[in-house]
Amino acid sequence: MIDDGVRAVFFDAVGTLITPREPVARTYAEFARRHGQDVAEERVRGTFREAFDRQEEIDRAAGWRTNEARERARWLAIVSEVLSRTHAYFDELWGWFATPAAWKIHPEAAEVILELTRRGLAVGIASNFDSRLLGLIDAFPELVPVRPRCAISSLIGWRKPAPEFFAYLIQLAGYPAAEILHVGDDPRNDVDGATAAGLRAILFDPHATTSGPAQISQLRDLLGR
């Protein structure tokens, strides 16, 4: 999947290298119950996507600008829409997702990162997250090789699929756009955004919900030539 023209590989974080240890809806419902709210996981699941998409539309209308304050505000808005009385425990929920206990790393991540590094490729992370991601990278030994090359939207000031995000990524990589491969699970943010900026892109689709030449269902597929 990676030819000799690729000099750097950047991975999306959430949904690609790491995923929540428990379904987000379950975690939200459990936090609500701890604070006296009887909220069904099914109800959370049913409203989360709509709330998330509304915040995405706000960011799109703003040209995909972001920062640390905006990321916290967008998640407060999402959680407040999904649950009620969240101001009483939003800080606790926000803090939970900053801990490695809330996450699990993809079982093939370590093998793939180490092998790509062994081949002489620059390997990094390009994520629509906030500064909490830096602590998570430090907490997972498998991700240590990517620490020097972390493009995080809240610290850059732009979210994927903004061209400014990928311009920063190109500068961080130190290679021309055509020599950089971006791998992620979001067709718009990770694939369309990257290719519009001149990068190569591969869609990571672990559930094989789509088909096409530029996609993989396992991270290990990247190691084939």
Image (spheres, grey):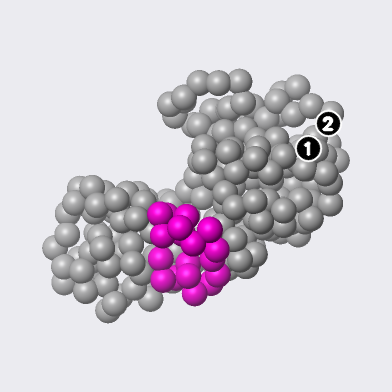
Identified at 76% across, 59% down, the residue is 148
Crowd tier of the residue under label 2, counting other residues whose Cα lies within 10 Å: few below 14, some 14–19, many 20 or above? few
The span shown in magenta is 56-74
Q: Quadrant of residue 4?
A: top right
Q: Is residue 22 above or below residue 223?
A: below
Q: Nearer the viewer, residue 107 or 38?
A: 38
Residue sitting at the far left: 38
The answer for how far apart the CA atoms under marks 2 and 1 are is 8 Å
Which three-letter amino acid code belongs to the residue tagged 1? Ala
Identified at 45% across, 58% down, the residue is 61
Residue 184: x and y, percent?
57, 41
Crowd tier of the residue under label 1, counting other residues whose Cα lies within 10 Å: few below 14, some 14–19, many 20 or above? some
Indicate which label's residue lies in the foreground, 2 or 1: 1
> Along the horizontal axis of the image, is 165 left or right of 76?
right
> Along the horizontal axis of the image, is 139 left or right of 113?
left
Res 204 seen here: yes
> The C terminus is located in which quarter?
top right
Q: Mark 2 sits on what residue?
A: 5
Residue 52 within the magenta-colored segment of the rendering: no
Residue 3: x and y, percent?
79, 27
Main secondary structure of the magenta stretch: helix
Identified at 61% across, 66% down, the residue is 157
Res 31 seen here: no
The tag on residue 178 is: 1
Q: Secondary structure at mark 1?
A: helix
Q: Quadrant of residue 176?
A: top right
Q: Quadrant of residue 112?
A: top right
Q: Nearer the viewer, residue 10 or 57?
A: 57
Q: Is residue 108 above or below residue 132?
A: above
